[in-house]
Image (cartoon, rainbow, N blue to C red):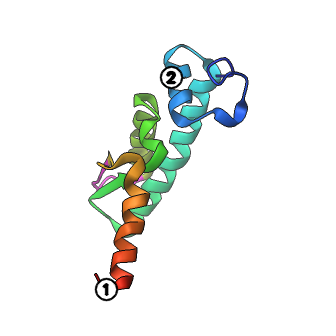
Amino acid sequence: MRNLAGNNLSDITAQLVSQAAAEGDNLANEVLEVAGWALGVGIGNVANLINPQLFVLGGGVTKAGAKFWEAVRRVARKTALPEVNFEIVPAALSDEAPLWGAVALAEDLLGS
């Protein structure tokens, strides 16, 4: 990861971690697994509480790669009760989701 980030640790992104994992970086693979585990546990617990049919994830996490998504889905399914059914998908707007949410909120507040 350090080489991909040009030794600038503040330049490390989810996409860069995913790229490093795809290139065989053990630390990057562990980072994706732990992050996927944490988010998966959270999603599984929320699913148990409110039983939604769909979780839509947006922002930089959508670029974390297949290993991350697999970990999130696996752990969420393992954490949730067997009778709770849901799907986890990336937001169609990806990184722009928060921006468009802010636009919608501003329009609503302005009465447009």
- Tell me residue 73's x, y (percent): 39, 42
The residue mark sitting in front, 2 or 1, is 1
Residue 19's label in the rendered image is 2
Q: Is residue 23 left or right of residue 5?
A: left
Residue 81 visible somewhere in the drawing: no
Based on the picture, tell me whether residue 85 belongs to the magenta stretch: yes
- Dominant SS type (magenta): loop
Based on the picture, tell me whether residue 74 belongs to the magenta stretch: no
- As displayed, is residue 47 above or below residue 10? below
Q: Secondary structure at mark 2?
A: helix
Q: Is residue 3 left or right of residue 39?
A: right
Circle 1 is placed at which residue position? 111
The residues colored magenta run: 80-88
Tally the numbered discs. Answer: 2
Considering every residue shown, the one lying at the far top of the view is 24
Q: Residue at x 67, y 17 (%)?
A: 3
- Tell me residue 90's x, y (percent): 34, 45
- Tell me residue 69's x, y (percent): 41, 37
